[in-house]
Image (cartoon, rainbow, N blue to C red):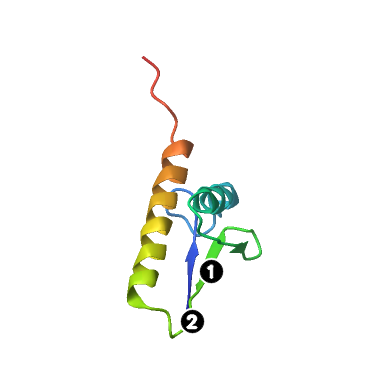
Amino acid sequence: MMIALELVKNRRADQPDAELAKAVVQAAGRRGLLLLSCGVYGNVIRLLAPLTIPERQLQEGLDLLEQSLAEASEAQRPSAVA
């Protein structure tokens, strides 16, 4: 089973976001989830789970990925200046 997430800026396929991919990989690593970025621009995260993965383990990994994506994208948002 393989699926990939291509991370881009402003929802534009012609604007790869390698910085976000790197941040997601780092955030996931802090949570104990090992990810690798790939692709020509380094903006793709590929998920390769074995077909025999227990559903609970798969869900745990996906939850960690979701948390990592949220953390990395929140860190890239410009902060509001008061």
The residue tagged 1 is: 46
79 over 57 or under it: above or below: above
Mark 1 and mark 2: span between their CA atoms?
A: 13 Å
Q: Position of residue 66 (x, y in %)?
A: 38, 55
* Left or right of residue 21, residue 11 in this image: left
Q: Position of residue 34 (x, y in %)?
A: 55, 61
Kind of residue at disc 1: Arg
Tell me the SS state at disc 2.
loop
63 over 10 or under it: above or below: below
* Circle nearer the viewer, 1 or 2: 2
Residue drawn at 56 percent across, 49 percent down: 26
Tell me the SS state at disc 1.
strand
Direction right: furthest residue? 40
Kind of residue at disc 2: Pro
Closest to the observer, 74 or 32: 32
Quadrant housing residue 11 = bottom left
Total labels: the figure holds 2
Residue 13 badge? none
Closest to the observer, 30 or 11: 30
Mark 1 crowd level (few <14, some 14–19, many ≥20, 10 Å Cα): some
Residue drawn at 44 percent across, 30 percent down: 78
Mark 2 crowd level (few <14, some 14–19, many ≥20, 10 Å Cα): few
Q: Position of residue 27 (x, y in %)?
A: 51, 48
Closest to the observer, 10 or 20: 20
Q: Position of residue 38 (x, y in %)?
A: 62, 64
Direction bottom: furthest residue? 51
Contact flag, marks 1 and 2 (Cβ < 8 Å): no
Residue 50 badge? 2
Residue drawn at 41 percent across, 56 percent down: 64
Q: Tell me the quarter of the image containing the C terminus.
A: top left
